[in-house]
Image: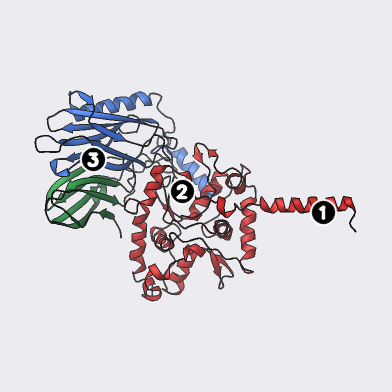
Chain colours: A blue, B green, C red
């Protein structure tokens, strides 16, 4: 709770540093974030085709709070030396940054899985990409509705 | 202080796929939050999580700010031999935590 | 012999009084529902699994602090209390409790600090500091599964009444009382989030909004700020009175600490 004195000090400080307080959102935000997602995807797969399949991305469709959303990915694979999953990548299309996690694994993992909790900044599509040992890429995506966003709202109180 | 909690079965059959759950104490400061005067709070996150089994890396994760605070990472590995599972978290500002868990494999 | 009009008046008055007390706030025990029931399945799972519940990190810290020497007395909590799993059983379930030295109820955080200052001869831990949260979480954890049992007697009754009044009083720029949402409109929604009955069964708890463990007072201060009311400082008697009332209002419900909430 800011006292009157604290408020006056803050007001004076923010007047003195106008460039720091960028309160306005970029009107092209959605387009820029989509472009960032495409670029991140490109970095991960090169020019390779990404096929839907083999990957199962699980997210709750409606979540309590975007600060912590349980996410798990499982990829169908025998996980043998000859045929296994080399990497699992998770990307978002509307977070301030598109990358979420990248998992590097091999046959010793037994199963190509990851379970974690992620931050989602908006209602959006989350994408999971699996890179197989034969160089092919497979993916799954999921839609999530987020009413309380991560990254963009202050959890001050 | 508890910097990480690791849940690993104490023993397993050879070749069995075991489940491992890890939880690390870390605020995962995204770098997108601002102070009341508008300054950005610098990013401070765990960047990498590695699991090694008797010295051999079996699972590695690159983390980004979109990973939630106090990160949970759960995965599997094959119980190949008796020994030590070692878990390491490394991140910004020299953050480094290591936890080990013994495993007996029959 | 009472005149028919007077009899009718008395009957109506009696009925009105009964109705008043029935709707005077407290949700009957069989209808009390924990905030747990208003959360998604996934958030419930997060609370239920100690190996994935972030609150565990604070409980473990508290366990370590309980055995750490502190203050000029160079004493650990363990030195006086022994194994917390026995000595701290049911403690959180009966706090806030009356402190004769202060002549008023104190909450668990204040009780821990009293021990620190008077027994360990150490400086008190700051409210919402990691150490105080850890010790409170560790102590509260020892009451998990046990029913809240706030006992009211002549000494604590005035403070309970103060808390009850605060709960029913309209305040802030939004001019709302706690009761209007949490007695009359629980199970409704506020900006997409469910309105719960506001029972503090799980404190200190890991709130996803805070991305951290926090105390009941932190939550209450947040509520008051949300009403655009003047919030009280940590440890203020107004807050402790309200905590006493809230815990008493939740009597019989099981402690869930360390809970997880959105």
Proximity of marks 3 and 1: CB atoms separated by less than 8 Å? no
Q: From the viewer's perspective, is C146 left or right of C52?
A: right
Residue picked out by circle 1: C10
Total numbered circles: 3
Numbered disc 1: secondary structure: helix
Callout 3: residue from which chain? A
Residue picked out by circle 2: C36
Establish whether labels 2 and 1 are both on one chain: yes
The residue drawn where x is 56% and y is 53% is C30
Numbered disc 2: secondary structure: helix
x and y percentages locating residue C161 in the rendered image = 64, 60
The residue drawn where x is 12% and y is 34% is A83
Depth check: give the residue in front, B13 or B67. B13
Which label's residue is closer to the chain start, 2 or 1? 1
x and y percentages locating residue A34 in the rendered image = 32, 25
Q: From the viewer's perspective, is C173 left or right of B51?
A: right
Q: What number is the disc on residue A113?
A: 3
From mark 3 to mark 1, how far is it between C-alphas? 72 Å
x and y percentages locating residue A130 in the rendered image = 21, 32
From mark 2 to mark 1, how far is it between C-alphas? 43 Å
């Amino acid at each position: 709770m800011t006292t009157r004195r604290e408020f006056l000090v803050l007001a004076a400080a923010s007047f003195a540093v106008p460039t720091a307080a960028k309160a306005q959102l970029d009107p092209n935000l959605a387009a820029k974030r989509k472009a960032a997602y495409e670029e991140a995807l490109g970095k991960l797969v090169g020019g390779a085709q990404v096929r839907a399949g083999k990957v199962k991305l699980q997210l709750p469709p409606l979540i309590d709070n975007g600060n912590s959303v349980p996410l798990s990915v499982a990829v169908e694979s025998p996980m043998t030396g000859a045929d296994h999953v080399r990497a699992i990548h998770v990307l978002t299309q509307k977070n301030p940054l598109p990358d979420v996690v990248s998992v590097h694994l091999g046959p010793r993992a037994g199963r190509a899985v990851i379970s974690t909790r992620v931050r989602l900044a908006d209602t959006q599509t989350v994408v999971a990409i699996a890179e197989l040992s034969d160089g092919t890429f497979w993916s799954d995506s999921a839609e999530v509705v987020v009413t309380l966003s991560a990254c963009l709202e202050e959890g001050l109180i | 202080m508890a910097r990480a909690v690791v849940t690993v079965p104490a023993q397993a059959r050879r070749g069995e796929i075991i489940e491992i759950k890890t939880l690390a104490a870390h605020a995962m400061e995204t770098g997108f939050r601002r102070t009341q005067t508008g300054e950005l709070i610098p990013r401070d996150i765990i960047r990498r999580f590695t699991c090694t089994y008797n010295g051999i890396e079996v699972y590695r994760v690159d983390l980004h700010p979109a990973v939630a605070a106090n990160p949970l990472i759960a995965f599997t590995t094959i119980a190949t031999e008796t020994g030590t599972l070692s878990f390491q978290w490394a991140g910004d500002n020299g953050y480094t935590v290591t936890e080990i868990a013994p495993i007996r494999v029959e | 012999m009472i005149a028919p009009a007077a009899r009718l008046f008395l009957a109506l008055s009696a009925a009105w009084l009964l109705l008043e007390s029935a709707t005077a706030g407290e949700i009957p025990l069989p209808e009390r529902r924990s905030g747990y029931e208003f959360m998604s399945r996934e958030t419930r799972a997060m609370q239920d699994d100690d190996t994935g519940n972030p609150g565990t990190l604070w409980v473990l810290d508290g366990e370590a602090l309980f055995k750490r020497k502190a203050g000029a007395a160079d004493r650990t909590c363990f030195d006086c209390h022994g194994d917390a799993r026995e000595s701290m059983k049911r403690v959180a379930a009966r706090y806030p409790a009356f402190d004769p030295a202060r002549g008023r109820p104190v909450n668990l955080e204040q009780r821990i600090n009293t021990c620190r200052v008077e027994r360990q001869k150490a400086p008190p831990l700051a409210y919402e500091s990691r150490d105080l949260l850890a010790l409170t979480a560790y102590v509260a954890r020892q009451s998990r599964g046990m029913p809240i049992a706030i006992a009211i007697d002549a000494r604590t009754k005035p403070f309970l009444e103060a808390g009850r009044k605060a709960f029913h009083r309209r305040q802030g720029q939004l001019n709302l009382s706690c009761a209007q949402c949490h007695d009359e409109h629980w199970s409704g929604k506020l900006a997409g989030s469910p309105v719960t009955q506001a029972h503090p069964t799980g404190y200190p708890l890991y709130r996803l909004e805070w991305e951290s463990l926090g105390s009941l007072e932190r939550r209450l201060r947040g509520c008051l700020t949300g009403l655009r009311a003047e919030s009280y400082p940590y440890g203020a008697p107004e807050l402790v009175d309200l905590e006493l009332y809230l815990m008493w209002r939740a009597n019989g419900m099981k402690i869930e600490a360390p809970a997880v909430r959105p």
